[in-house]
Amino acid sequence: MPEAAIETGHGLVIFAKNKKRVSAFYRATLGLTATEETPSHDLLHGIGIELVIHAIPRKYAADIQISKPPQVREDTPFKPAFLVPDLEAVRTAAKATGGFLKPLDAAWHIRGNVVLDGWDPEGNVVQFKQSADHGR
């Protein structure tokens, strides 16, 4: 009997040198659940979103150097943005999993949200948005 489909609205594939570490970052910062974990990829789900953290094949990954802290990859044409309930919870989760979230004084406000950029453990820039009404 086939597995029940998990309804998702949007998805994103993220290629990672260290799949386990990058997967832990997105699970913690976005509260996602792994519904599949294989050597090649982790399939993460949340309400309306599906992320695939895909391991970069070893023959290519060997040539990729990730510094500590990672060099931020700001020269990419894509920056995923995620609505989260609490930016401070994201900050704590990002720090615990090797990522980073900019300080609150770097935030900007747009369309009723407080917005901050950060990055995952491999330096991929990620934007997190919290409702400006949070905590009221």
Image (cartoon, rainbow, N blue to C red):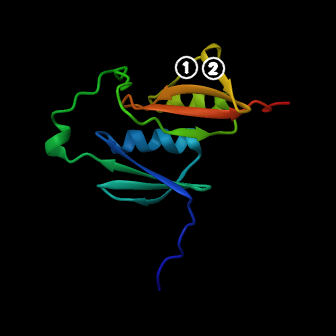
Give the side of residue 121 with respect to residue 62, left or right: right
Residue drawn at 64 percent across, 13 percent down: 105
Dot 2: element = loop
Residue drawn at 25 percent across, 45 percent down: 56
The front one of 67 and 9 is 9
Residue sitting at the far bottom: 1
Q: Residues within 10 Å of mark 1 (few under 14, many from 20)?
A: some
Residue 102 image label? 1
Distance from Cα at disc 2 to Cα at disc 1: 8 Å
Figure check: 95 above or below 81: above
Where is the C terminus found, in terms of image quarters? top right
Give the side of residue 115 with respect to residue 67, left or right: right
Asked whether the viewer can see residue 116, the reply is yes
Q: Position of residue 7 (x, y in %)?
A: 57, 66
Residue sitting at the far top: 105
Q: Amino acid at mark 2?
A: Ala
Q: Quadrant of residue 9?
A: bottom right
Residue 107 image label? 2
Asked whether the viewer can see residue 95, the reply is no
Q: Position of residue 64 (x, y in %)?
A: 21, 32
Give the side of residue 91 with respect to residue 77, left or right: right
Q: Quadrant of residue 20?
A: top left
Q: Nearer the viewer, mark 2 or mark 1?
A: 2
Q: Position of residue 89 (x, y in %)?
A: 64, 32
Q: Amino acid at mark 1?
A: Lys
* Tags 2 and 1 touching, CB below 8 Å: yes
